[in-house]
Image (cartoon, rainbow, N blue to C red):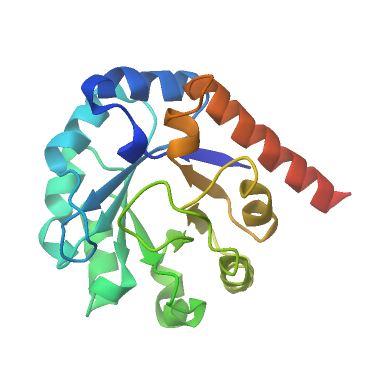
Amino acid sequence: MIKIAPSILAADFGRLGAEVTCAQEAGADLIHVDVMDGRFVPNITMGPAVVEAVANAATIPLDVHLMIVEPDRFLRRFADSGADSISVHIEACTHLHRVLGQIKEVGCRAGVALNPHTPASALQEVIDDVDIINVMTVNPGFGGQSFITGMTRKLRTLRAMVAGRDVEIEVDGGINAETIASAMSAGATIAIAGTCIFQHEKGIAAGIADLRRAAELAIANDES
């Protein structure tokens, strides 16, 4: 099943609640929230208060992506604010196995994000503890970047690694109606997209529809 997760990083924060409502009414499966601290990545975005505001507007799951150092210090706060899943960066966690357990202890699905330079093999020893893998197809920190095509190899490797397991694979960065096809064909199950949804010239619903149509066509071609 194809899942579309609009990233509110590209939304109009002056009318965030309305944008979230529009996205879910248009068929979004999750709402993706990018949390950046200005240390792990060169940008600062939002915190638990924004997650809580989104949770108040949303009836679909909130997928929170922590691009921060020492993420274990904030897991409870994001869970209490309404996160359904929390992903941390493998590059930011000295004790990743422990952090994955802590995410589950606060009642959330546990995710791991991998920067472009991090190999799929880095997850081998914790693969049984992961619910979601977020494959960064841009260098994290800013929206609107171009998809790094070489990441499709990593997606294929991860799809083979999680075969038989109930693990979602997210593709995050540079996703649009052109790039989603290769990502889905390579094994992604969740497409995270911001600019091509919230800044689509015909509106949010059209952006989601374009993505889903392109993804479904790619899968149909793979099966034929």
- The x, y position of residue 8, in whole percent, is 33, 36
Name the residue located 40 percent from the left edge and 76 percent from the top edge: 126
Figure disc tally:
0
Q: Is residue 9 above or below residue 100?
A: above
Q: Is residue 115 above or below residue 171?
A: below
Name the residue located 37 percent from the left edge and 47 percent from the top edge: 143
For the N terminus, the image quarter is top right
Which image quadrant for residue 12?
top left
Name the residue located 50 percent from the left edge and 36 percent from the top edge: 196
- The x, y position of residue 30, in whole percent, is 43, 37
The front one of 20 and 160 is: 20
Q: Could you tell whether 13 is left or right of 116 in the image?
A: left
Q: Is residue 46 above or below residue 162?
A: above
The front one of 167 and 31 is: 31
Which image quadrant for residue 122?
bottom left
- The x, y position of residue 89, in whole percent, is 31, 67
Name the residue located 43 percent from the left edge and 76 percent from the top edge: 117
The front one of 139 and 7 is: 139
- The x, y position of residue 135, in whole percent, is 47, 62
